[in-house]
Amino acid sequence: MNPTVTEMPAPVNSGAIESRQNRNLEMQLIPEALARAHVHERLQQAESEHRGHRLAAARRMQRRAERASLRARRALAMAVMQ
């Protein structure tokens, strides 16, 4: 009687081999995970800087609009006074 593949017992140290292979695979994937984390951090930093630039631009435009409004009020007051 020939044993089939499913009936053959597993090697005694197959768990150790599989564990070692998983550890080796994890070790090989560490640089990829680090690179992914680094890219994610850089993207967050760039988005934060972009928000800062937009905020600064919005504040400049607001000050410019306030100055224009003040000039318009002064011009109106001068026109009314004459």
Image (cartoon, helix red, strand yellow):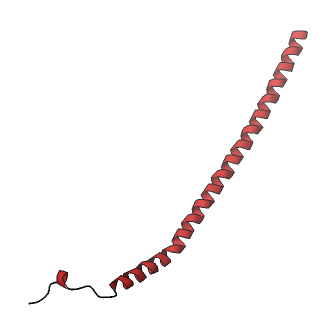
Say if 40 sits above or below 64 in the image. below
The residue closer to the viewer here, 25 or 55, is 25
User: Which residue of the protein is positioned furthest toward the bottom in this rendering?
Assistant: 1
Give the total number of marks visible in the rendering.
Answer: 0
Residue at screen point 67% across, 47% down: 51
Residue at screen point 17% across, 83% down: 7
> Which quadrant of the structure image shows residue 12?
bottom left
Say if 29 sits above or below 70 in the image. below
> Which quadrant of the structure image shows residue 65?
top right
The residue closer to the viewer here, 49 or 37, is 37
Name the image quarter holding the C terminus.
Answer: top right
Percent across and percent down for residue 62 are 75, 33
Percent across and percent down for residue 76 are 84, 15
Residue at screen point 58% across, 63% down: 39
User: Which residue of the protein is positioned furthest toward the front in this rendering?
Assistant: 12
The residue closer to the viewer here, 80 or 50, is 50
Name the image quarter holding the N terminus.
Answer: bottom left
Say if 39 sits above or below 65 in the image. below
User: Which residue of the protein is positioned furthest toward the right in this rendering?
Assistant: 82
Q: Is residue 62 left or right of residue 51?
A: right
Residue at screen point 69% across, 44% down: 54
Percent across and percent down for residue 14 are 33, 85
Say if 32 sits above or below 10 in the image. above
